[in-house]
Amino acid sequence: MSDDPIREGFGRRLTDAVRARGPLCVGIDPHPSLLMAWDLDESPRSLERFSMTAVEALAGEVAVLKPQSAFFEVYGSAGIAVLEKVIREARQAGALVLLDVKRGDIGSTMTAYAMAYLDEQAPLAADAVTVSPYLGYGALAPAIGIAEQTGRGVFVLARTSNPEGAGLQQSVHGSGDSVAQYVVDSAAETNAGAEPLGHVGVVAGATIHPGELDFSRLNGPILAPGLGAQGATVQRLHEVFGDALPNVLPATARDILRHGPTPEGLRAATNRVRDELTQLLNA
Ligand SMILES: O=C(O)c1cc(=O)[nH]c(=O)n1[C@@H]1O[C@H](COP(=O)(O)O)[C@@H](O)[C@H]1O
């Protein structure tokens, strides 16, 4: 990546990347159990070996790589240095990097988070981040604004893939819809009129009930984690997302990473999922 500011909007950049490489998003989650399975110890050096193997194997292949920040933060500043390298080299190899940090705070602090991850000059600048709307969708405005100015994106948690999410996210919001639907509709308002797609995505697990949410006005991407280790299948995506399927980024981490440590193993596992997705999208 050059230091030049990004001139195109995230919706355009994502659409082009998905057209070229397919919609699969692979998570880089260096779980201790995966390090062990790869014969690596729990050290910053092994963290780097693990994550850079994933970057080298996959950053030239998939549209989106999604490093999970917590697995790097565990190692303190040494882990953050590895995360900086992962982001930089994955972007240089042509992948969009969605940094999974799930940040959300009062507006003034949210500006600082946005400067940490979405500003051109930030050492941890990714192409997009995950954000949490628990302090209110409006509190995310600084991140949404800075992302728009810098050609980047945000993915707002709407209906998460974990079983504990349902109670809170399906409860009724003041609008009369579920909280999750309110988040989707709020993102839709921000994205209205953007072409080919707005820069505010939502997160909706591939594990949720079919038809639970109406994405018809969203005009933005949908990150759908939960494939593989959490039990969702590619075949299920059509049931869950219906007509919104072309805007879905199905995401999987452990189910790919367990096929390491060889780059060939990682690529073969990725290609199997990509082939299934191609079949689904062309059906
Ligand atoms: O925002 C996310 O990425 C996310 C949202 C969600 O609803 N569920 C979810 O699993 N994730 C993340 O997606 C990844 C899923 O990993 P696997 O279950 O190994 O595929 C983890 O890094 C989670 O933190």
Image: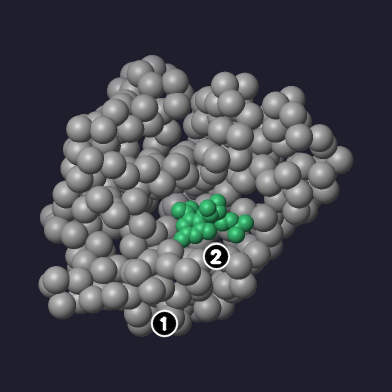
Residue drawn at x 21%, y 53% is 136
Residue reaching furthest to the right: 39
- For label 2, the SS is loop
Image position of 165 with respect to 65: above or below: below
Residue drawn at x 20%, y 32% is 108
**Sooner in the amino-acid sequence: mark 2 or mark 1:** 1
Residue 273: horizontal and vertical position, in percent? Answer: 63, 63
**Residue 230 located left or right of residue 128:** right
Residue type (three-letter) at the residue carrying disc 2? Gly
Image position of 170 with respect to 254: above or below: below
Residue drawn at x 47%, y 69% is 164
- For label 1, the SS is loop
Query: Does label 1 point to a residue whose CB lies under 8 Å from ligand 1?
Result: no
Q: Residue 226 carries which label?
A: 2
Query: Does label 2 point to a residue whose CB lies under 8 Å from ligand 1?
Result: yes
Residue type (three-letter) at the residue carrying disc 1? Pro
User: Do tag 2 and tag 1 residues touch (Cβ < 8 Å)?
Assistant: no
**Residue 12 located left or right of residue 230:** left
